[in-house]
Image (tube, rainbow, N blue to C red):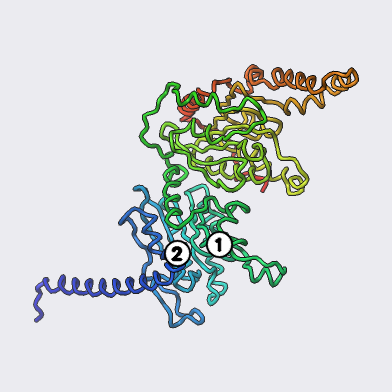
Amino acid sequence: MRDNDSSDIPQTTAEKIAQFRQVVTEAVAASDTSAQERQHPKGKLTARERITLLLDTGSFVEVDEFVRHRSTSFGLESKRPHGDAVVTGMGTIHGRQVAVYSQDFTVFGGSLGEAAGDKIIKIMDLALSSKVPIIGILDSGGARIQEGVIALGKYGEIFRRNTMASGVVPQISIVCGPAAGGAVYSPALTDFVIMVDKTSQMFVTGPDVIKAVTGEDVDMEKLGGGLTHNKTSGVAHYLAPDEEDAFDYARVLLSYLPSSWDDDVPTYASDPDREITDQDRKLNTVIPDNPSVPYDMTSVIEGVVDPGSFLEVQPLFAPNILVGFARIEGSSVGVIANQPNQMAGTLNIDSGEKAARFVRFCDAFGLPIITLVDVPGYLPGADQEWNGVIRRGAKLLYAYAEASVPMITVITRKAYGGAYIVMGSKHLGADLNFAWPTAEIAVMGGQGAVNILYRNEIKRAEEAGEDVAKVRETLANDYTYSVASPFLAAERGEIDSVIEPAATRTTIAKGLRALKNKWEHRPSGKHGNIPL
């Protein structure tokens, strides 16, 4: 008869666990060593090293660690490493839960097959059900050729989940290597794309195919490198000099964002000064006496938000408009501002699309929108018209009109024509609109108005031999001080008040406190049809 001494069972179980741990530890160590030998010489980290840098120390819980690709994959029967080209799991950033997947270029070139696709799909579903941000670290040659349509199908399922998660949880893509072919559309569907200079590329069609089809000779970096997508195409939102900086930017970015659309906006302890300070009074000298002289709107932003809190997004693309996150009295806000020292702050196709997407992101996740306006109008030119400035420029108008979060707008120097309406005007639904005494709000500037309204007076001055330039200046000033005056706009209720520049910070802070519980009822429907 067998002895029922239960002490044998724990011992046997312990031995099995110890044996299993040893096998796993040796396999992981061998895999990591091999991966490091292949990645580090290229200036790249391994998939697991990237997760370690991104997440809080010791917080990562891996999912599907031992999944292997299906052995029926053509040509891959003898190669079945654990993980199948992607590491997935959950962890924390600043103590807040996130879902993450990191593609492993050292396994089948990071290519996506059935098993790897299922792992990513599973972690995205988990993120959606848990209402936590999704962070994808991309380093992949694209769909796994050996698995054909199955691999393509998994991309389609990932794209669908990117779309389902849009506006529900924040999505961040960190591109640390290639993202080619259909693979580029997953990051394109996410909210923010971070690229690493010189080591990351994104393109639908590679240089070899382009040369074969069109004869155009272009290298990978120029075609789809980090600088190209940050400065020219606008696909990316931040260009990191190395991977460590990319992960640091992602961590800082997340500190401004709620975990989901119905979560509270992040708020940090703050001891705000509610009286006008000497630092505030520096804003009184920002605007140059000459209306044609540019200035840096960044100095205005930094003067109205919590010190050191402004995090710019897409700084290299369409620099004539600034967008980014900041804090006011410790609470996150989104900031949109014209930049007078770039193209005089005019709006064009690129700046309109950049700002429109940012406004819609802030609205989706409940972040109040602060708009600082100094815009002379839209950039004129046949190129802008032919490329659809009407249709594409309407995106920003649509975004502001659709937004239901608290919105506060301050006009610092000028707001002319349709650009005045588009930049967070009261007519599009902004809650509070203010102007500095230097502001001009009109259909056009004084000099342009003179050419239309006072052409007869100018002609008579020419015939009489008078100083035409002086006459023109006098008429322009009269127009500015009468028709374009911010006090006239305030008198008619088009803006709420004319404020001293030094009072901007305290005025915005008080406005946000008053709008804290804002709620809007909108007509029901499936969704609007933004002019894409």
Total label count?
2
Q: Residue at x 38, y 66 (%)?
A: 64
- Is 230 drawn above or below residue 473 in the view shown? below
Snapshot quadrant of residue 210 = bottom right
Seen at 82% across and 20% down, the residue is: 467
The kind of residue tagged 2 is: Lys
Residue linked to disc 1: 201
Q: What whole-number distance in Å separates the C-alpha atoms at marks 1 and 2?
A: 13 Å
On screen, residue 199 above or below 251: below
Residue 259 in view of the camera: no
Query: Toward which corner of the image does residue 430 lie, by quadrant?
Result: top right
Name the residue type under label 1: Gln
Q: Viewed as shown, does residue 27 lie left or right of 453? A: left
**Residue situated in front as seen by the camera: 529 or 170:** 170
Residue 25 horizontal side relative to residue 412, left or right: left
Q: Which residue is drawn at 43% across and 42% down?
A: 263
Q: Which of 445 and 182 is in front in this view?
A: 445
Question: What is the crowding at mark 2: few (fewer than 14 residues within 10 Å), some, or many (at least 20)?
Answer: many
Determine whether 121 is above or below 512 in the image.
below
Circle 2 SS class: loop
Q: Position of residue 238 (x, y in %)?
A: 52, 51
Q: Residue at x 57, y 55 (%)?
A: 227
What secondary structure is marked by label 1?
A: strand
Q: 80 or 158: which is nearer to us?
A: 80
Answer yes or no: is residue 85 visible: yes
Q: Residues within 10 Å of mark 1 (few under 14, many from 20)?
A: many
Give residue 44's mark.
Answer: 2
Report the side of 41 relative to 9 (left or right): right
Q: Which of marks 1 and 2 is nearer the N terminus?
A: 2
Residue 150 placed where, x, y %? 54, 72
